[in-house]
Each structure stands twice: as C-alpha cells, then as structure tokens.
Image (spheres, rainbow, N blue to C red):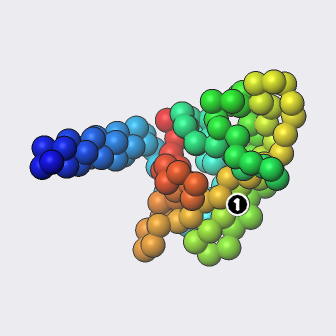
C-alpha cells in the first residue's frame, strides 16, 4: 500500500513539474491583453472551451481558428470570449474562465488548472 502511495505521489510530482516546465513564458500580468491570451490559447495542448451547452475539448477544436473577441476581467477573475471552429466545421462561440492566483500575477484556467502561458 505504501509503495502505491509513493507511486501516485511521484506521478503527481511529474505532472505538476511538466506543467511548470511546459509553461514557457507565463502570462504574468495583472491585466490581461488579447494578444497574450490568444498566443497562450494556441499553445495549450489540453483543456477546453465552454459553450452554452457543454465544454468542448481542445482536441475537438481546430486551434488555429480560435480568435479572442473580448476579455471581461473583474479583480482576480476573467472570462475570455472567443470564436472557434470545431473539427466538424461548425462555427461556435465560447469562453474560457480564468483566475489569477492569490498574491501573484499568474493566471490559470479554472476548469483544469493549467497555467496560462505562451510557448
């Protein structure tokens, strides 16, 4: 049982370490800019965009079609509104909820806690 716990701790460490290493250039700012967020969204490999009915995985989206329309920011939270086309060719509108970590300038996706970073 102890070895199983050590194994899961090791896997968790690797996961979070790769998230930090993968981050490249963090979007490290009190106020989000469209250009920074656009570049960061295009470099994310997993996660999703919320729509009215569900969350669409980035694997099901043609990421080159994601266009940030607007950013609504209040304090430590933000909604990034965007247009995109899914793999079926449907044009959709959605948003990505973000939160700024306490006492820092680092932004993360509220759905899956990935760092908002540019490659």
Task: Report the residue at 70% width, 40% height from top.
Answer: 56
Left or right? Give the position of 35 relative to 24: right
Q: For the point 30% across and 46% down, which residue is it?
A: 12
* Extreme residue toward the left, this view: 2
Asked if one can make out residue 33 in the rendered structure from this viewpoint, the answer is: yes
Counting from the top left corner in percent of width and height, residue 113 is at 49, 54
- Disc 1 on helix, strand or loop? strand
Q: Image point 71% across, 31% down: which residue?
A: 61
Classify 87 as above or below 14.
Answer: above
The spot of residue 20 in percent (x, y) is: 36, 46
Residue density around tag 1, few if under 14, some if 14–19, many if 20 or more, within 10 Å: some
Which quadrant of the view contains residue 14?
Answer: top left
Relative to 85, 47 lies left or right:
left
Residue at the location (83% across, 45% down)? Answer: 93
Q: Is residue 6 visible?
A: no
- Residue 18 in percent (x, y) is at 34, 39
Give residue 71's quadrant in the image: bottom right
Q: Name the residue tied to disc 1.
A: 79
Camera-nearest residue between 29 and 44: 44
Taking the view exactly as shown, the residue that stands out farthest to the top is: 88
Relative vertical location of residue 78 with respect to residue 65 in this rendering, above or below: below
Residue nearest the viewer, comparing 19 with 9: 9
Q: How many marks?
A: 1
Q: In this view, does 98 lie to the left or right of 2?
A: right
In the figure, residue 43 lies in which quadrant?
A: top right
Q: Residue furthest right?
A: 91
Whether residue 19 sits left or right of residue 67 in the image: it is left
Image location (x, y in percent) of residue 76 = 58, 71
């Amino acid at each position: 049982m102890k070895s199983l716990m050590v194994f899961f701790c090791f896997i968790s460490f690797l996961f979070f370490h790769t998230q930090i290493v993968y981050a490249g250039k963090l979007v490290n700012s009190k106020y989000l800019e469209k250009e920074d967020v656009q570049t960061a969204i295009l470099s994310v490999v997993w996660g999703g965009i919320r729509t009215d009915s569900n969350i669409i995985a980035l694997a099901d989206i043609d990421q080159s079609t994601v266009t940030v329309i607007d950013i609504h920011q209040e304090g430590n939270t933000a909604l990034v509104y965007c247009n995109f086309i899914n793999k079926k060719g449907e044009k959709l509108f959605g948003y990505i909820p973000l939160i700024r970590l306490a006492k820092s300038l680092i932004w993360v996706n509220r759905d899956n806690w990935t760092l908002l970073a540019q490659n």
